[in-house]
Amino acid sequence: ASAVLLPAVQEGAASVEELRLAFGPVVASIVEDSIWLKELPEHTGLMDDDSSRVLREYMVAASRDHRAVLVILSDRLLKLRQDQAGDVPLYLQHLRALESLQVHAPLAHALGVGKFLWELEDLSFRTLFPGSYSSLEDWQRQLWEESEEMMEEAKVEVLASLNRNEYLVARAGRYTITSRRKSVFSTFKKMFQSHKNREQVLDVFAMRVVIGVKDEYQYESQVQAEVCRQAYSSARSALSSWTEPRGRFKDYVTRPKG
């Protein structure tokens, strides 16, 4: 509700006090925080990496309700979408895109809102570097068309392997297997930071297996840990016939980062 009502207050069609009377103090407070948070970047002179980091940390720490941060993220995402479809001057689009990459996308990452993060990054990248964006997007689309059948076959093999594991059959209530395509901006960032061309980016596609244990094991941590180990072993067994690039397999399950 707060995200929908924010533009009304910004355009002067309603006041925060009117929202408080009509929708209650919580909604009004979130809208009030959102207005204040939106104005903070305007008071930051130099938007370099250090200033952006301090600003992001302050926005999260100073907001009375973290949902206000989600509201400004959704508002920014809406603005970027409108920029793509409207006749906003190019320099304003560039300013908004740069600010989104420096402030809003990292905020989305910090809050764990992946869908916001990926779209904020991709729309900003598309605005700033339309040629590079189109080239990478076309390449990814072509790869996906070539690989979609392969990903579906992999899902079938992994599911069959999971269902052959007696330990999992007895303790797992459900499996969800999904595939994902790396975002265009994330692909570009990896190329830039690792000095690679696009063909050297090896994680353009990925598969995620989510396992839900049966209700009776919801609070048994040892069982849950063993379910994870068994599932990982089954998935690795299913894909053992696939050739791994030498020296490029990173096992973050048995050897977590950091």
Image (spheres, rainbow, N blue to C red):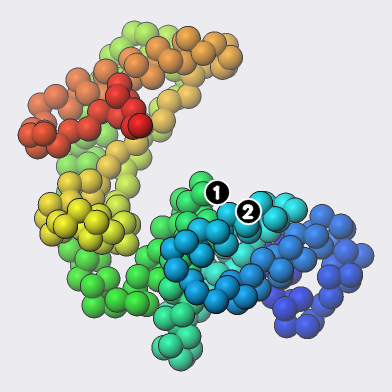
Q: Any mark on residue 217, and which?
A: none
Residue bearing the label numbered 1: 111
Q: In which quarter of the image is residue 3?
A: bottom right
Q: Can residue 72 be seen in this view?
A: yes
Mark 1 Cα-neighbour bin, 10 Å: few <14, some 14–19, many ≥20: some
Q: Position of residue 132 (x, y in %)?
A: 23, 72
Q: Are marks 2 and 1 in contact (CB under 8 Å)?
A: yes
As helix, strand or loop, the secondary structure at mark 2 comes to: helix
- Identified at 75% across, 53% down, the residue is 64
Q: Any mark on residue 60, and which?
A: 2
Does label 2 or label 1 sit earlier along the sequence?
A: 2
- Identified at 32% across, 62% down, the residue is 185
Amino acid marked by disc 1: Leu
Q: Where is residue 195 in the image (x, y as percent from the top left)?
A: 16, 57
Closer to viewer: mark 2 or mark 1: 2
Q: In which quarter of the image is the C terminus?
A: top left
Q: Nearer the viewer, residue 190 or 134?
A: 190
Judge left or right: residue 69 versus residue 211: right
Vertical arrangement, residue 117 with respect to residue 9, above or below: above
- Identified at 62% across, 65% down, the residue is 72
Judge left or right: residue 203 versus residue 6: left
Q: In which quarter of the image is residue 191?
A: bottom left
Distance (Cα) linking label 2 and label 1: 9 Å
Q: Where is residue 26 in the image (x, y as percent from the top left)?
A: 82, 55
Amino acid marked by disc 2: Val
Q: Where is residue 114 in the image (x, y as percent from the top left)?
A: 46, 51
Q: Nearer the viewer, residue 28 or 153?
A: 28
- Identified at 22% across, 46% down, the residue is 203
